[in-house]
Amino acid sequence: MKTRILAVLLALMMVAAGTAMAGTLTDIVKRGELRVAVQSGAAPYAFVDKDGKPAGSMVDFAQDMADRMGVKLKILDFDWDGLIPALLSGKADILAADMTPTLKRHLKITFCDPWYYVQPCVFTTTGASFQKPEDANNPDVTVGVLLGSTGETIAKKYLPKAKIKTYKGGGRMIVQALLAGHVDAGVNDDLAVLTVLPDFPPNSVRVLPERLGQGKDPLAFAVRHESVNLWQWINLYFKFARSDGSYDKNVKYWMESTDWKKDH
């Protein structure tokens, strides 16, 4: 009798688990809307263009996902430290930001397969004496980073002697702080830095040739732990996008050129 009861309970638990795993993807289709959390101050990943519309590489990928699902796209804008809470609270179905998967973050959310790779770098004013990243590892040096970012983690690891100052918002905030004299150097991924530099006075900022850390850091979309079917769908989506050319088209336009600046 006990064995039969346990078998029934196990079956019910498996059904419940299967329902939970399929829930997010099913809800999106029923709702007719895909809700995606972004940080809009992070060109070329996600930003608000000159017409006041969401734009960027990850926004375009999200729109393509919604189109292939046959639903509408809703972009939700949050500060960096609000992205994971927005996903966990159910406000968003997907987190789409220039976020690197880490073991600590994975305790809260599930990352999809990486879709792009970047390298952390140190940047400073043109007149600064820094020639290599180790030169910034000094108690007299203040390094600007984005709050909660991988750049913050890497700066603390590889520049432990420097004073670390955190900022909220996109990479532009660190460059502004640097030129205002609030920090002596900054740490962010190289693409994010190189993208915003044309918006500042020419030759005012330089990126140190040697990158910080070891190897490249992956970027990935993320979902809630229970959204297993949505996680599988996103990974499958990128396989299709790579095979049909839409992935290359997105990356070449947004990540490997500045043509988008003329259009947005």
Image (cartoon, helix red, strand yellow):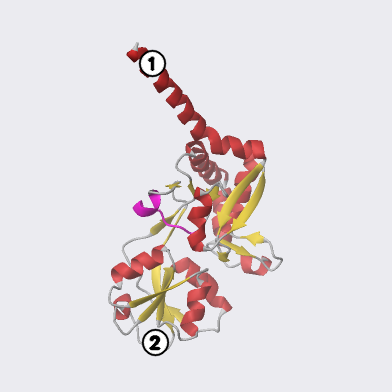
Q: Is residue 114 above or below residue 43?
A: above
Q: In the image, which disc is placed on residue 5? A: 1
Q: Nearer the viewer, residue 202 or 6?
A: 6
Q: Residue at 49% x, 85% y: name it.
A: 180
Q: Position of residue 67 (x, y in %)?
A: 65, 44
Q: Is residue 153 above or below residue 223?
A: below
Q: Position of residue 118 (x, y in %)?
A: 43, 61
Q: Which residue is mark 2?
A: 128
Magenta-tinted stretch: 98-106
Q: Position of residue 123 (x, y in %)?
A: 42, 77
Sequence order check: which comes first, mark 2 or mark 1? Answer: 1
Q: Going by the picture, which residue comes out furthest to the right?
A: 51
Q: Nearer the viewer, residue 128 or 2?
A: 2
Q: Is residue 100 left or right of residue 72?
A: left
Q: Residue at 52% x, 45% y: name it.
A: 238
Per the model, the C-alpha gap separating discs 2 and 1 is 73 Å
Q: In the image, which disc is placed on residue 132? A: none
Q: Is residue 102 visible?
A: no
Instruction: Report the amino acid beneath label 1.
Output: Ile
Q: Is residue 7 visible?
A: yes
